[in-house]
Image (tube, grey):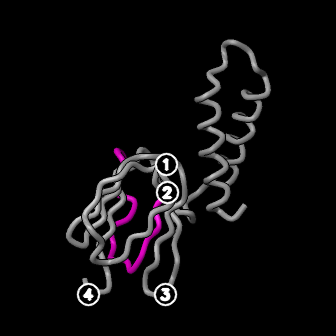
Amino acid sequence: MSDKTQRLEIVTPQRKVFSEDVSFLVAPGTEGELGVLPNHAPLITSLNIGIMRIQQEGKTFKVVVTGGFMEVRDNKVTVLANAAERAEEIDVARAEAARRRAEERLAKKTPDIDVLRAELALKRALTRLKAAGQ
Protein backbone atom coordinates (compact mmCIF):
# COMPACT_ATOMS: atom_id res chain seq x y z
CA MET A 1 0.00 0.00 0.00
CA SER A 2 1.42 3.37 -0.99
CA ASP A 3 0.89 6.63 0.86
CA LYS A 4 -1.69 7.52 -1.81
CA THR A 5 -3.93 4.54 -1.09
CA GLN A 6 -5.82 2.99 1.77
CA ARG A 7 -7.03 -0.55 2.37
CA LEU A 8 -10.77 -1.09 1.88
CA GLU A 9 -12.50 -4.20 3.14
CA ILE A 10 -16.21 -4.76 2.65
CA VAL A 11 -17.58 -7.79 4.46
CA THR A 12 -21.04 -9.23 5.04
CA PRO A 13 -22.12 -12.10 7.27
CA GLN A 14 -21.83 -14.35 4.19
CA ARG A 15 -18.58 -13.27 2.51
CA LYS A 16 -15.80 -10.79 1.89
CA VAL A 17 -17.02 -8.67 -1.03
CA PHE A 18 -13.97 -6.43 -1.51
CA SER A 19 -10.45 -6.33 -0.07
CA GLU A 20 -8.05 -4.12 -2.00
CA ASP A 21 -6.08 -0.88 -1.86
CA VAL A 22 -8.04 2.13 -3.15
CA SER A 23 -7.31 5.81 -3.63
CA PHE A 24 -10.75 7.22 -2.74
CA LEU A 25 -14.23 6.10 -1.80
CA VAL A 26 -17.64 7.62 -1.23
CA ALA A 27 -19.96 5.82 1.18
CA PRO A 28 -23.71 6.28 1.76
CA GLY A 29 -23.70 7.40 5.39
CA THR A 30 -26.97 7.79 7.26
CA GLU A 31 -26.30 11.55 7.45
CA GLY A 32 -25.32 11.84 3.77
CA GLU A 33 -22.51 10.76 1.50
CA LEU A 34 -19.06 10.56 3.04
CA GLY A 35 -15.83 10.79 1.03
CA VAL A 36 -12.71 9.11 2.40
CA LEU A 37 -9.18 9.82 1.17
CA PRO A 38 -5.97 8.24 2.49
CA ASN A 39 -4.90 9.56 5.92
CA HIS A 40 -8.51 10.38 6.85
CA ALA A 41 -9.20 11.09 10.51
CA PRO A 42 -10.46 8.07 12.47
CA LEU A 43 -14.22 7.65 12.49
CA ILE A 44 -17.06 5.19 12.87
CA THR A 45 -20.36 5.79 11.11
CA SER A 46 -23.53 3.95 10.21
CA LEU A 47 -24.37 3.32 6.58
CA ASN A 48 -27.61 3.65 4.69
CA ILE A 49 -28.83 1.64 1.71
CA GLY A 50 -26.85 3.05 -1.19
CA ILE A 51 -24.00 2.82 -3.65
CA MET A 52 -20.36 3.00 -2.59
CA ARG A 53 -18.18 4.53 -5.29
CA ILE A 54 -14.60 3.30 -5.16
CA GLN A 55 -11.67 4.73 -7.11
CA GLN A 56 -8.72 2.50 -7.78
CA GLU A 57 -5.93 3.15 -10.28
CA GLY A 58 -8.05 5.64 -12.24
CA LYS A 59 -11.09 3.37 -12.46
CA THR A 60 -14.36 3.70 -10.56
CA PHE A 61 -16.20 0.70 -9.16
CA LYS A 62 -19.62 0.52 -7.55
CA VAL A 63 -20.69 -1.66 -4.65
CA VAL A 64 -24.26 -1.67 -3.33
CA VAL A 65 -24.53 -1.83 0.46
CA THR A 66 -27.79 -2.30 2.33
CA GLY A 67 -26.85 -0.66 5.59
CA GLY A 68 -24.21 -1.45 8.16
CA PHE A 69 -21.22 0.32 9.67
CA MET A 70 -17.93 1.77 8.47
CA GLU A 71 -14.75 2.32 10.45
CA VAL A 72 -11.81 4.40 9.22
CA ARG A 73 -8.51 4.06 11.08
CA ASP A 74 -4.82 4.00 10.16
CA ASN A 75 -5.44 4.02 6.39
CA LYS A 76 -7.80 1.08 6.63
CA VAL A 77 -11.52 1.34 5.90
CA THR A 78 -13.64 -1.54 7.13
CA VAL A 79 -17.26 -1.82 6.05
CA LEU A 80 -19.48 -4.29 7.89
CA ALA A 81 -22.56 -4.45 5.69
CA ASN A 82 -25.86 -6.26 6.12
CA ALA A 83 -25.52 -7.22 2.45
CA ALA A 84 -23.28 -5.99 -0.36
CA GLU A 85 -22.61 -6.78 -3.98
CA ARG A 86 -20.45 -5.38 -6.73
CA ALA A 87 -22.39 -3.72 -9.54
CA GLU A 88 -21.24 -6.36 -12.04
CA GLU A 89 -22.63 -9.14 -9.80
CA ILE A 90 -26.17 -7.76 -9.71
CA ASP A 91 -28.83 -10.00 -11.21
CA VAL A 92 -30.94 -7.36 -12.97
CA ALA A 93 -33.93 -9.67 -13.51
CA ARG A 94 -33.97 -10.55 -9.80
CA ALA A 95 -33.70 -6.88 -8.80
CA GLU A 96 -36.50 -5.95 -11.20
CA ALA A 97 -38.72 -8.71 -9.76
CA ALA A 98 -38.00 -7.43 -6.23
CA ARG A 99 -38.94 -3.91 -7.33
CA ARG A 100 -42.25 -5.11 -8.78
CA ARG A 101 -43.08 -7.13 -5.63
CA ALA A 102 -42.36 -4.17 -3.36
CA GLU A 103 -44.42 -1.80 -5.50
CA GLU A 104 -47.33 -4.26 -5.52
CA ARG A 105 -47.21 -4.57 -1.72
CA LEU A 106 -47.17 -0.81 -1.30
CA ALA A 107 -50.08 -0.39 -3.73
CA LYS A 108 -52.31 -2.84 -1.80
CA LYS A 109 -52.45 -0.75 1.38
CA THR A 110 -54.00 -3.59 3.37
CA PRO A 111 -53.48 -3.86 7.15
CA ASP A 112 -51.39 -7.02 6.82
CA ILE A 113 -48.70 -5.24 4.73
CA ASP A 114 -45.61 -4.11 6.62
CA VAL A 115 -45.21 -0.76 4.87
CA LEU A 116 -41.73 0.01 6.23
CA ARG A 117 -40.44 -3.39 5.16
CA ALA A 118 -41.91 -2.92 1.67
CA GLU A 119 -40.42 0.59 1.39
CA LEU A 120 -36.97 -0.71 2.36
CA ALA A 121 -37.29 -3.58 -0.14
CA LEU A 122 -38.18 -1.07 -2.84
CA LYS A 123 -35.21 1.14 -1.93
CA ARG A 124 -32.84 -1.85 -2.06
CA ALA A 125 -34.19 -2.95 -5.44
CA LEU A 126 -34.00 0.54 -6.94
CA THR A 127 -30.45 1.00 -5.64
CA ARG A 128 -29.37 -2.33 -7.13
CA LEU A 129 -30.93 -1.41 -10.49
CA LYS A 130 -29.26 2.01 -10.46
CA ALA A 131 -25.84 0.50 -9.71
CA ALA A 132 -26.32 -2.01 -12.52
CA GLY A 133 -27.03 0.85 -14.91
CA GLN A 134 -30.73 0.11 -15.39
* Residue at mark 3: 58
Q: Residue 2 — which label?
A: 4
In this rendering, would 99 be left or right of 77?
Answer: right
User: What residue lies at 30% left-to-right and 60% top-to-bottom?
Assistant: 78
Cβ atoms at labels 3 and 1 below 8 Å apart: no
* Residue at mark 1: 48
Mark 3 or mark 4: name the one nearer the start of the chain. Answer: 4
Q: Is residue 3 magenta?
A: no
> Crowding near pointer 1: few (<14 within 10 Å), some, many (20+)?
some
> Crowding near pointer 2: few (<14 within 10 Å), some, many (20+)?
many
> Please, which residue is most extreme toward the left here?
74
Cβ atoms at labels 2 and 1 below 8 Å apart: yes
Q: Is residue 45 above or below residue 53?
A: above
When asked about the image quadrant of residue 129, the answer is bottom right
Mark 2 or mark 4: name the one nearer the start of the chain. Answer: 4
Mark 2 or mark 4: which is in front? 2
What amino acid does circle 3 point to? Gly
Mark 1 or mark 4: name the one nearer the start of the chain. Answer: 4
Image quadrant containing the N terminus? bottom left
Mark 3 or mark 1: name the one nearer the start of the chain. Answer: 1
* Residue at mark 2: 28
Task: Please tell me which residue lies in front, 105 or 46.
Answer: 46
Image quadrant containing the C terminus? bottom right
What amino acid does circle 4 point to? Ser
Mark 3 or mark 2: name the one nearer the start of the chain. Answer: 2
Per the image, label 2 sits on a secondary structure element best described as: strand
Q: Please report the bounds of the magenta region as a residue range.
A: 11-27
Q: Is residue 94 above or below residue 131?
A: above
